[in-house]
Image (spheres, rainbow, N blue to C red):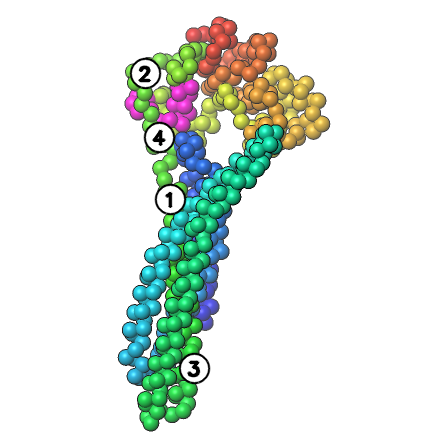
Amino acid sequence: IAVFGYSMAVSIGGIFASRHLHLNLLHNVLRSPMSFFERTPSGNLVNRFSKEIDTIDSAIPPIIKMFMGSTFNVIGACIIILMATPLAAVIIPPLGLVYLFVQRFYVATSRQLKRLESVSRSPVYSHFNETLLGVSVIRAFEEQTRFIKQNDMKVDENQKAYYPSIVANRWLAVRLEYVGNCIVLFAALFAVIARNKLSAGLVGLSVSYSLQITAYLNWLVRMSSELETNIVAVERVKEYAEMEKEVHCVVCYTCRSQVSCSYISSQQIGIVGRTGAGKSSLTLGLFRINEAAEGEIIIDGINIAKIGLHDLRFKITIIPQDPILFSGSLRMNLDPFDQHSDEDIWRSLELAHLKNFVSSLPDKLNHECAEGGENLSVGQRQLVCLARALLRKSKILVLDEATAAVDLETDKLIQSTIKSQFEECTVLTIAHRLNTIMDYTR
């Protein structure tokens, strides 16, 4: 009953703990600032979500169960040995201290080796992902040999930490067997010394359990060491699960200090400036990707710093300079929340001058978009974003060089569509072409 009880408790507790850690990691990574993804290699994220979570799911709960079972077995065996041969009380505590010393010495090394192995594994994942993304370019320039060598070097670096951990494990096994055999030796020796006072049955019982306690102690020390070594996975997951979220990112540039401007509803505003003047940074501040160090941005009398990021960004639509589409159908990219009918979607495509193109596709709205929209041109992706904006009809529309990748004729058509379809919306346009904003209010 006790074994069933602790096994059930560890299994259920492990599931809840793993789920809690995974959700915290996922939510925190999704709410991380853009700078986090720019400076963090993809292999680090893949490592956390794959190997580390797998360790927490599959390795740690069984280790805890075996550790608890070994603890009860050792305690039970020690009690029986002491009852059969009381003289064993003289040697069991010192040998227990030897076990503890060996275990502490091993854990201090294996924990660091495990951490080094986990850290060196991330570059292997990163290099593999980057190679897959650029495989066509690698083949075009016939650089396969160089990338294979780079992969081998990174795997070798990982093995420099992994192989010593296996050797350390074997080192521990030899020492534990040696100390365990000492217990058998002394149990038999004390049985011989006290042979006149002990029956043959008690001697046999003492020697029998001393043989078993060797395996129990070996397993106990090994499981305690494995537990402390694998707990590094929890440490690495919590590192990303407890980092600062997006809202703590603050920018302060003196070139845009004391900027003050106000826009009336339904106006079309053009923002023009040289490269690096801070045009796109105003957009980052509007969406709170970067938090302003001072001042405030007020929309309809509400300070955007005091509302949730989801609520703010759901009410504003942007057509970025480098549009990104998600892997999935064209319809999903246009209407991700399935809020509009097919008729509305086709109308938005017509207004965005994409209807003829989509009609020519074999699957039409079910056309499968590659990750990032790589199977569409930059101009087509921007027009898809325009069609999405026409569907949403947000009160604020931000165009960040939205027509930079289309020809002048298409640019004129798009500007005409924006002027007619967003006449009740506030439009902020960041542009390099002056003719793009010539008809704007300001």
Q: Position of residue 56 (x, y in %)?
A: 45, 53
Q: Bounds of the magenta span? A: 280-296
Residue 405: tell me if it is visible: yes
The mark closer to the camera, 3 or 2, is 3
Q: Which mark is residue 255?
A: 2
Q: Which residue is mark 4?
A: 249
Residue 281, magenta (yes or no): yes
Dot 1 or dot 2: first in sequence order is 1
What kind of element bears circle 2? helix
**Residue at 42% over, 27% down:** 312
**Spatial separation of the CA atoms under disc 4 and disc 1:** 18 Å
Q: Quadrant of residue 271?
A: top left
Q: Position of residue 385 (x, y in %)?
A: 55, 22
The mark closer to the camera, 3 or 1, is 3
Q: Which mark is residue 194?
A: none
Q: Which residue is mark 1?
A: 239
**How many residues crowd mark 2 within 10 Å: few (<14), some (14–19), many (20+)?**
few
What kind of element bears circle 3? helix
- Whether label 1 touches label 2, CB < 8 Å: no
* 420 is higher (above) or lower (below) than 120: above
Q: Amino acid at mark 4?
A: Cys
Dot 3 or dot 1: first in sequence order is 3
Q: Position of residue 357 (x, y in %)?
A: 67, 20
**Spatial separation of the CA atoms under disc 3 and disc 1:** 47 Å
The mark closer to the camera, 4 or 3, is 3
Dot 4 or dot 1: first in sequence order is 1
For residue 79, side relative to residue 311 (left or right): left
**Spatial separation of the CA atoms under disc 4 and disc 2:** 19 Å
For residue 12, side relative to residue 80 (left or right): right
Q: Quadrant of residue 255?
A: top left
